[in-house]
Amino acid sequence: MRDTTIIISEFGTSVRKRGGRFVIRGCDNVTREVAASRTERIILPTRGASISTDAIVLAVEEDVPVYFAHQNGRPVAYLTAARGNGMARTRRAQYSASHDTSACLIKGFVTGKISNQRALLQRKTRDRRATLGRHRELNESAIEGLTQSMEQINALANDEPKLVNKIMVLEAHAASRYWASLGTMIPDRLEFPGRRTRGASDPVNRLLNYGYAVLRNEVWSAVTYAGLDPFCGFLHADRSSRPSLVLDLMEEFRAPVVDSIVMRMVCQWNAPPTKIVEERRLTSWATVQLMQLIADRLSSSVPYRGESVRMDVIISRQAELVARTLRGCGTTYRPFTRRL
C-alpha cells in the first residue's frame, strides 16, 4: 500500500537509493528510509536539494512520480516512465475532437467545478450556521446563485454561438459569489481581500495559489499517463508553455482538494499572518503544513461512482475518462462531484 509522500523542503537535503528504498538525508545528517513500494510521490519544492540518478531510476521503475517545483509551488518539471499508454490514438483524437465532444468536456469541467464549490459552501454554512449571523443570507444566496449558474450552463446548446465565452461569463459570476461567501468565514486578522492570483501577498491567497500549484502537478501526471497532450485544452486557450488541458481538468478538483483544506487551515489555526507569510512568500512552516495536508487529502478515500476511492485515483480515472470520451468509446464525460 502506498501511503507516503516524500517532501524535500530543506536546503541541503538529498535523496538516494539503498536497495528498494529511498534514503533521505537532511542537512543535519539525520537520515530516514522509505520503501519505494510505499511511496506515492516525491516533491522537491526547494533549491539546494538533490536526488541521485539511482533514486530516479528506482522511482521510475516503481511508478513513483518525481515533481520539481519553484519555491512558490509552480511546477518546473516532473519525471515519469518513458512509455506510452495508447498515446498516439488518444492524441490524434484529442487534436481532431468534434465540436460536440469539446462542448461536452467544457460543460463537464465547469459544472463540476461549480458543483464542488456549492458543496463546500453548503458544508461550511451548515457547520457554521450558529455563528454566521448577518452573513447567513449572503451565503444561502450564493448557494442558490451557483445552482442557477450550473442550470444555465447545462441549458446551453452545444452549437451555441460563442459557447466558451458564455460559459466563462457564467463561471465568473459563480466564482464571484463563491469567494464573497467564503470570505465571510475567514478570520478578519488574515485580511482576505477577495480572490487574487498573481501578486497576491495575503496569507489566504498565498496558500490557495501554492495549493493549486501542487494540485497541478498531480493532474499533469494523470493527464500524461492517460496518453493526453497536457498542452492541448478545450476550456483554457492554448498558449506557449501553458498546460491548458491540465488547467481544464483541475477545475473540478480545486474546491475538494485545495479550497477545503485552506479554509480548514485558516479557520482552525491561531497562527498570526506573519507565521504564514513572510516577505510576500509562504514560510517554510506553512509550506510543509499545506503540502502534507494536500498529500493526505489525495490519499484519502471519498465516494465515487458507488464505491470508496482515493482522491488521487479519482483524478487518474477522470483523466482516463477524458481520453475515452475523445476516442469515442461510447462514453460521455461526467465530472467528479462531491456531495454534501
Image (tube, helix red, strand yellow):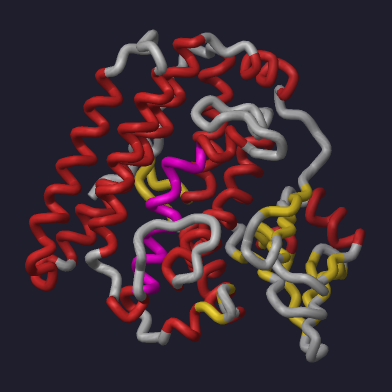
Residue 284 point in image, percent of width and height: 61, 79
Q: Residue at x 49, y 18 (%)?
A: 102
Residue 315 point in image, percent of width and height: 52, 42
Q: Quadrant of residue 113?
A: top left
Q: Residue at x 31, y 33 (%)?
A: 170
Q: Quadrant of residue 53?
A: bottom right
| Side (left or right) of 247 relative to 32 | left
- Is residue 223 positioned above or below 79 on the image? above
- Is residue 199 positioned above or below 148 on the image? below
Residue placed most toward the observer, 170 or 288: 170
Q: Which residues are magenta?
A: 249-266
- Is residue 173 positioned above or below 89 on the image? below
Q: Quadrant of residue 97?
A: top right
Is residue 6 magenta-colored? no
Picture quarter with the N terminus: bottom right
Residue placed most toward the observer, 20 or 183: 183
Residue 72 point in image, percent of width and height: 63, 64
Q: Residue at x 45, y 41 (%)?
A: 251
> Residue most toward the bottom?
28
| Side (left or right) of 55 relative to 196 | right
Q: Residue at x 53, y 25 (%)?
A: 234
Residue 48 point in image, percent of width and height: 82, 74
Is residue 265 magenta-colored? yes
| Side (left or right) of 28 relative to 155 | right
